[in-house]
Image (cartoon, grey):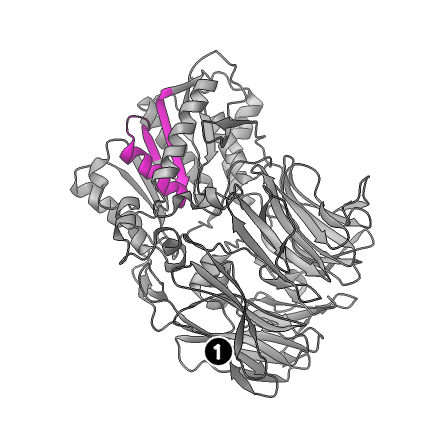
Amino acid sequence: MYSSTLTSEQSANSADFPHQFARSRRFSLGVPRHFTVSPDGRRVLFVRTGSGTDPVGRLWQYEDGTERLLADPALLVGAGSGAVPEEERLRRERARERSVGVVSYATDDAARLVAFALSGALWAVRSDGGTPFSVPAAGPVVDPRPSPDGRYIAYVSRRCFHVVDLTGADRQLARAEDPEISYGLAEYAAAESMHRSRGYWWAPDSRHVLVARVDTSPVERRYLSDPADPTKPPQAIRYPAAGTANAEVTLELLSLEGERVEVEWDRKAYEYVVAAGWDAHGPFVTVQSRDQRTMRTLAVDPETGATEVLHERTDPAWVEIITGTPARTASGALVLPEDEGDTRYLTVGGQRVTPEGLQLCAVLGVEGERVLFTASDDPLETHVWCHEPGHGLRRLSREPGRYTGAARGGTVVLAGLTPRGNEVGVLRGAGADGADGDPPYQALTSLAEEPSITPRPVHLTLGERKLRGVLYLPSWHEEGTGKLPVLLDPYGGPAMQVVGRARDWFTCVSQWFAEQGFAVLAVDGRGTPNRGPAWEKTIHGDQLGPALEDQVDALRAAAARCGDLDLTRVAIRGWSFGGFLAAAAVLYHPEIFHAAVAGAPPTDMRMYDTHWKERYLGHPEEQPENYERTSLIGHGHLLSRPLLLVHGLADDNVAAAHTLRFSAELLAAGKPHSVLPLPGATHLPADDAVNAQLLNFQRDFLMSALEGGAGKK
C-alpha cells in the first residue's frame, strides 16, 4: 500500500530525511541568529555555525553589505580545550541549545567590545578590527557581559560574581557563601518557565550592577543517575515541584568599589522575580505572587534599595509574562502588556497603542520613544511591528511567516520562518520605517541544509471554534484513490504553535510521516498562543479536557472535509505536552484513537515545576482536583490501545519518573504497552543517531499497530 505509489526520488528523499533532520539539529545549524545592531545602524553582529551540519558557532559581523568573520573557535589557540562549566551546561539545556563553540555573546553599548565564553575561558574581540584575545579570569566563566562603556567584563565563576578589566585585574564583588547559593545566575524556574535566562544587569554608569542572589537550599532535591553506566554516581539537582518550596531569590546593588545594597520588597507576597533591568531612569524589577494573579513593576532606589510600585497587573486566572516587558522609553514611559477580553494590547505610558485583535507577543527593544515588538493579527503569522509617536503603528515584516528581529540606528534585522524556510534580512531607511515601496534589503547568508522533504500543507479552519489546523497528504496520493490512515501530530499546549504559514522542522517532520502513507493532521487548540488571553486561559484548572476535545473535534471536521481519511485507523504522536496529549488520547478515547507514541510525557502534574504547573492548575494543596483531573497517573487501567512511551533518562525537565511510574501502573493493571528508554538523553535528545532512528522507530510502531505489521515500507 505504501511503497507501490512512491517515485524513486520521493523514496530516496524520504529515506534520507531522518538522518538529515538529526545531523542538521532540526535544520537549525547554519542559520544566522542572536542579532545586535550598533547604535549607528551600520553594523550587525550575529552567530552562525559553519554549515548546515557543522555545530560549531562562529561570531560574524555584517557591515556595508559584507559579512566578516570576527571569531572562529577553531582558529583560537586553546579554545575549546576545557570542559563546559556545569552552570553553562544547564543554561544551554534550559535554552534547548544544541550547538557548541560561540553559542552566545554580549557587547558594550557601542557594540565595539564583544565578550563570549569558550569551554569556560573568557574571550573578547573588537568589532572594529583585530583578532580575538583571551582575558584572564578567576575560574571557569559563565555568561560574560561587558559594561556599557566597554572597560570591564562581568561574569559568573563557581557561582561567584566577578568583574574584570581587559588587563586581567579581577574583582570578586559577591562570593557564594554556600554551595546552595549563587550570584548572577537565573534559577531553574526563571530560566525554564519565565523567559528569564540571566541574573545580573549593568547600570548605565558602568560602575554598578544589579545582581540576583539565589539560595536553592529550600528546594526539593532530585537525583539523576545513568542506568547505562552503574559506576557513575548520581547527580543531585534542585527541582521545585508543584506545591513545594521555590528557590529564595533576592537582588543586590553592587558597586565596583565593593558597596552592597539589598533591594527591598515584600518577598513573602511576591516570591518570583520575573524581570529586572537598569536604564537611564534607574534600576527596576518585576515581581509576581506565588499564585501568579498579581504582578508588580517596582522602581528601585539605587542608594537605599527601597522600592515603589510603578504598575500592577492582576488577573483572576494568571498574569501572562511577556518577553521584553517591562521596558521604558527615553521619556520614562512604561512599556507593558494589557489583557482585556480577546486581545493582548501593547501599552506605552498607560495608553494602548495597538488595536483590538492584534495580539502582542513580545517586546524586542526600545530606542528613544520607538518600540519594536512582535504581534499577530492572524494565528498563522507573527510579524515585527513598531510604534513611535508621530508615526503611529507600522508593520515591518511583509511576507507571510513568523518573524522576530532587532533594531537600532535606523536599521532593522528581520529573522523569519517563512514558507521557504529560515530567512534573515537587514533593512535600512524607508524599509526600517515601515514606509511603502520596496525597501533597501540585504539578506544575511543562511548555510542551513535544504530539507529533502517539501511540506505540502493544506490549511483548514475546523469546527465551531474555528480551530486552526493543517493537513499533510502524501505527495504521491491522488484524491479518491484510497483511504489513508490518519496520524494526529499536535503539541497542543501553552507557548507553542505547530500550525502556521512557515516551513519549520515540525512541518517537515509531519510531511515525512505523510510520505510514509499517513494523512497527517496538526491542530492548535485552546491554550495555544496568538488567539488572545481568553483563548489561552480557557484551560485554567484543566489542561487536558479542552485540549483533547479540540483534537477530537478537529479530526472529525477534517474527515468531513477530506473523504480519504480513514477513521478506523487513527494514531497520534507527540513530545512533552504533545506526548501527554497522545497518551491521554488512547486512554480516554480508544473508540477514536487506535495507537499512540508519547515522548517525554508529564504523566503526573504534581511532579512538574511550580511556576509552570501552578500557573494553570493552582496550588496542589488548594486545588488537588485539578491535578487529579489532568494527570494520567491513576488512570492507567483505562488503556486498551497500543502505546509507546519514549523518555530520556537524563531529562531534568520532565523526569523519567513520569514514564517509569506510569509504566509500572500499566503493568500492574495488566495493560500491555512499550517503553523506549534513551540513556543519557535530556528533554531534547542530542544524539544524532538516536534522533534519526527515533523517527523510523515511531513510524514502524504506528504502522504495525494500525496495520497488524503489514504495509511497512
Q: Which residues are magenta?
A: 567-596
Between 323 and 189, which is closer to the camera in this rendering? 323
User: Residue 533 location, x and y as percent?
Assistant: 49, 46
Residue 608 spot, x, y in % from top left: 35, 55
x and y percent of residue 712 in the render? 39, 24
Residue 482 left/right relative to 381: left
Q: Nearer the viewer, residue 440 or 611?
A: 611
- Side of 508 relative to 128 (left or right): left
Q: Residue furthest top?
A: 481
Image quadrant where residue 588 sits: top left
Is the residue 165 above or below the residue 350 in the image?
below
Q: Residue furthest front?
A: 351
- 550 vs 345: above or below: above
Give me the residue at 73% from left, 66% from top.
Answer: 111
Residue nearest the observer in this picture, 336 or 688: 336
Left or right of 411: which side holds 53? left
Q: Which residue was labeled with disc 1?
A: 264
Q: Residue at x 46, y 67 (%)?
A: 86
Q: Quadrant of the N terminus?
A: top left
Quadrant where the C terminus sits is: top left
Task: Specify whether residue 632 is in view.
Answer: no
Residue 557 horizontal/vertical position (percent): 43, 23
566 over 232 or under it: above or below: above
